[in-house]
């Protein structure tokens, strides 16, 4: 078979790992990303044992570091001629204000800026696929944002849920603008809400449990693999169905401005 290659960020636990299991079982060549060698090796063994796949590989990167993201992109470019699917899944929830080594609020840095930069750095590999797909794991929390251009980096105030919600809105804004910029290519970009799922993030951020990670992976797997999803572009999905995102995510002026702000923050244009 013409084995397709998928990169999944944050694939060492939770929804990301389950997504890797599902795609490995379907015969995909899966690149498992993590930020700690021990957790990466544990995930690799578990996914291999469960699926019997011989087409698993691992990459390490700290998504709180733009330098590390550049190194990750370089490693992937050196190893793989094409990326068919990129699932931007990694995410964190911070209860206290912390900044990345680049000076950005940590939630925004990891959940949005790293994926914005990494996806752009790997676009050439995605465009080599005859059916390239970018899958951005957002959250229904993005609907609750009080958007403020002057507080993207917690310049005025910080709240854990507010920062998380902003980063999840950022996922949708990025996904929608990317979809527009990719028109005329073979690559599609969509975002999704995985559901309220029992993960490390849910327990740490909200002290609650939810549905299974298998349920949480369903929409990511659908967007990554389904023939019926091949024509979907610039949409936000819940339970494998197109849904309505925050109204601001359809405002072209906002999308373009947010892209330029993100490009400046990540140094993309330089």
Image: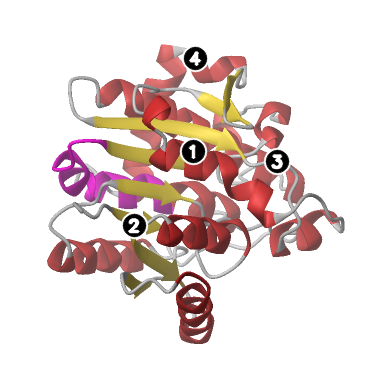
Main SS of residues in magenta: helix
Q: Is the residue 223 above or below the residue 24 in the image?
A: above
Nearer the observer: mark 4 or 1; the answer is: 1
SS type, badge 3: loop
Name the disc covering residue 250, or none: 4
User: Which residue carries the number 3 mark?
Assistant: 195
Name the disc covering residue 222, or none: 1
User: Which residue carries the number 2 mark?
Assistant: 28
Q: Give the CA separation, mark 4 to mark 1.
A: 23 Å
Badge 4 or badge 1: first in the primary sequence: 1
Badge 1 or badge 3: first in the primary sequence: 3
Residue in front for this viewpoint, 237 or 248: 237
> What residue do we see at 41% from left, 67% from top?
32
SS type, badge 2: loop
Q: Is the residue 162 above or below the residue 78 in the image?
A: above
Q: Give the CA separation, mark 3 to mark 2.
A: 24 Å
Q: Is residue 42 visible?
A: yes
> What residue do we see at 59% from left, 68% from top?
13
Nearer the observer: mark 1 or 3; the answer is: 1
Q: Give the CA separation, mark 3 to mark 4.
A: 22 Å
The image quadrant of residue 163 is: top right
């Amino acid at each position: 078979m013409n084995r397709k290659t998928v990169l999944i960020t944050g694939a060492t636990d939770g929804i990301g790992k389950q997504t890797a299991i599902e795609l490995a079982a379907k015969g995909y060549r899966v690149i498992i990303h993590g930020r700690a060698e021990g957790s990466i090796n544990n995930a690799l063994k578990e996914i291999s044992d469960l699926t019997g796949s011989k087409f698993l590989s691992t990459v390490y990167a700290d998504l709180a570091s733009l330098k590390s993201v550049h190194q990750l992109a370089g490693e992937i470019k050196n190893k793989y001629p094409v990326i068919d699917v990129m699932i931007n899944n990694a995410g964190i929830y911070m209860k206290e204000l912390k900044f990345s080594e680049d000076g950005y609020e940590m939630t925004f840095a990891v959940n949005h800026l790293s994926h914005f930069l990494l996806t752009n750095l790997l676009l050439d590999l995605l465009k080599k696929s005859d059916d390239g797909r970018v899958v951005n794991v957002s959250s229904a929390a993005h609907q609750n944002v009080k958007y403020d251009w002057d507080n993207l980096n917690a310049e005025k105030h910080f709240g854990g849920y507010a920062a998380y919600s902003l980063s999840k809105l950022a996922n949708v804004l990025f996904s929608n603008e990317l979809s527009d910029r990719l028109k005329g290519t073979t690559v599609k970009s969509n975002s999704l809400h995985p559901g309220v799922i029992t993960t490390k993030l849910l327990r740490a951020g909200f002290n609650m449990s939810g549905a299974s990670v298998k349920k949480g992976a369903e929409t990511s797997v659908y967007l990554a693999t389904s023939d019926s999803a091949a024509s979907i572009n610039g949409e936000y999905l819940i339970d494998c169905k197109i849904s309505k995102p925050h109204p601001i995510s359809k405002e072209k002026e906002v999308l373009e401005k947010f892209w330029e702000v993100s490009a400046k923050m990540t140094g993309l244009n330089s």
